[in-house]
Amino acid sequence: MSVSAIRPTNVAESLVTERELGVVAAELAVSGKRMAARPRHELAVTLRDKIRAGGDPLGEAFCRIRTPRERRNQGATYTPPAIVHHMLEWAARHKTPARVVDPGAGSGRFILAAARRFPKASLVAAETDPLAALILQANAEVLGVSGRLTIEETDYRDLSLPPIDGVTAFIGNPPYVRHHRIHADRKNWLVDTAAKHGLRASKLAGLHIHFFLKSLALARPGDYGAYITAAEWLDVNYGSVLRQALGDGLGGLALHLLSPTAAPFPDALTSAAITCWEAGHQGSTLAVRMIEGPDQLDGLRARRSVPWSTLRKTQRWSTIIRPCDRRTGGAIELGEICRVHRGQVTGANGVWIAGKHDGQLPAHVLFPSITRARELFSAGDALSSAEHLRRVVDLPRELDSLGRSDRSLVDEFLLWAKERGAHKSYIASHRRPWWTVGLRAPAPILCTYMARRPPAFVRNLCGARHINVAHGLYPRKGLSDAQLTGLTKWLNRNVGTEQGRTYAEGLTKFEPREVERLLIPRPEDLE
C-alpha cells in the first residue's frame, strides 16, 4: 500500500488501520531525514505541520485505532499534554539534566517535551511496541531531535545506561499491567531486584512497580525523576515495596494525588499519583498534595509536608493526602457504629449457588442471597423481596442432624459436588467441614464494593444473605429502623468514588476497613 492510497481528508477519518498509520509514520520519518524534503503526500504534510506546532496527531490516531482494551495488555495509556507540561516544569525547576530517560515512551510525549525543555540533554526512550516506536521516530525526525535520541525497542527492565557526566532525569508514565499478565520470570526479577536494595517485593505487584525498582537500580545518587502512575500503590499491600523505597534509597521528594475528576487519563477513569524522587536523597518530610482538577497542577508545587516518621507507620498513604479523610463538624467514622464484613466466599459458585443441580434440596439449607452486585444496584434504597434472588446452599456442620429424607437428598447432592471437585477447591480444603459454606447472618445494610461508580447501600428488609460480591454492615449496638434507613440514604447521597481506591482499569474498590472509615453524621442526626 502506498501513502497516496490514503485519502487526504481529516486525520481522524483518514487513518483507520494500523497499516495506514505505519505507512504515514514511515513517510514522515524518511522525510525528516531528508531535512527540507517535502513528504510525498498531502496528509503527511498536514501531520508534519501539526507535530511542529506541538501536537501529537500520530499518537492520537494510535490511541483511536488501538482501543484501550487492546492496549491494556501492554499498559499503554497516553498522558495528556497538560500533565506532561507540569511534570517537565517540576523537572526543570529541580535540576538541569545531562540525560533524560523515558521508560515507556509511546509516541514520545514526555521525551519530546523534554527535548524542547532541555536542548543540550541526550535522550533515551524505551518502547516495546514497534508501531509506537515508529511513531516516536517520525515525531523526532520532524522535530529535528533524532540526532540526540536513542530509541531502545526493548523492555525497560532490560535497559542498560552507560555512565555520563551530569545527572539523569527519569520522566514518564510507566505502563500499568496487573500481575496476572506478568510472566513468572519477571516476577522473580522484581523480587531479586528489590532484595539487592534491602527491600521485600510482592509478586502481586503491577508493572509500574517493576519500573520504579528498575529506576532505582539504574539511578546514581543525584539522578532524579517524576512518574505518573495509577494511585492504588499508595494503599495496597504490593505497593509497600515502593512506599519503603521512597523513604530509603529512591528518595521521595513529593507526591501529588490526582482524583478521577482531574481526568489524568482520557481513556481510563482512575485516580493517579505523580511521584517525584531523587536517588540517595534523605529528607525528613515528603511534600504531598491533593489535586481535584487540571487547573491545580501548578507546576507540581506541593504545599504541605508529612514527616517520614508518620509515613513509615501508615499503611494507607491516601488517608494522609485526601482532605475528605479529616474529621469535620462532629462527624464520626462509620466503624464506630457498624462493623463491615465482606460476604462469604463459596469456593465454587457453580456448585453452591443452587440451580438445576440442587436435586430438590430441603428449603432450610437454601438461603436467598445477593450473588451479583447488580442486584443491589437495581434495588434502590431498600431490598424488600427475595423472590428474584438465587439461593446459596449452606449445609449444617453435622449432617446427622438431618432427617432421613433430607439426608438422602443432601448425600446425593454432595456426591454430585464431589464429582465436580468442589471438595478440592482452595476454600473448601481449608474449611471444616468442606461442605459448609458458612454464610453470615443477614446484614441490616448491604453494599457493593467494586464498580465503575460509587457503591450502592441498600436496606436489607427481606433478610437476604450475601456472598463475596458485597459487604454487610452490622450495627455494634442497636440502631432504630429510622436510623438504619437514614444512614442508608445518607451514604447513597454522600459517598463518591474519590473515597475509595480507583484502579487503572476504572474500577473503584472499597475494602471493609475503608467503608468503616467513612465519615458520617451521628446516629441521632440520621432519623
Image: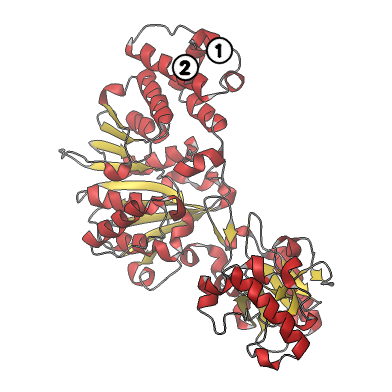
- Residue closest to the eye, 134 or 168: 134
Residue 183 point in image, percent of width and height: 38, 51
Residue at x 21% of width, y 49% of height: 222
Q: Name the residue under label 2.
A: 24
* Quadrant of the snapshot with the C terminus: bottom right
Where 174 falls versus 150 (above or below)?
A: below
Residue at x 58% of width, y 71% of height: 422
Where 167 falls versus 451 (above or below)?
A: above
Q: Mark 1 points at which residue?
A: 6
Three-letter amino acid code of the residue under disc 1: Ile
**Disc 1 vs disc 2: Cβ atoms closer than 8 Å?**
yes
Badge 1 local density, few (<14 within 10 Å), some, or many (20+)?
some
Three-letter amino acid code of the residue under disc 2: Val
Q: In this view, does 165 lie to the left or right of 120?
A: left
Label 2 sits on a secondary structure element that is: helix
Residue at x 42% of width, y 30% of height: 132
Q: Which of marks 1 and 2 is nearer the N terminus?
A: 1
Q: Is residue 162 visible?
A: yes
Residue 284 point in image, percent of width and height: 29, 65
Residue 401's disc number: none
Badge 2 local density, few (<14 within 10 Å), some, or many (20+)?
many
Residue 417 point in image, percent of width and height: 63, 72
- Residue closest to the eye, 355 or 224: 355
Q: Distance between the residues labelled 1 and 2?
A: 9 Å
Where 204 falls versus 175 (above or below)?
A: below
Residue at x 53% of width, y 55% of height: 503
Q: In this view, does 456 lie to the left or right of 235?
A: right
Q: Is residue 10 left or right of residue 460?
A: left
Residue 47 point in image, percent of width and height: 49, 17
Label 1 sits on a secondary structure element that is: loop
Q: In this view, does 459 lie to the left or right of 286?
A: right
Where 339 falls versus 254 (above or below)?
A: below
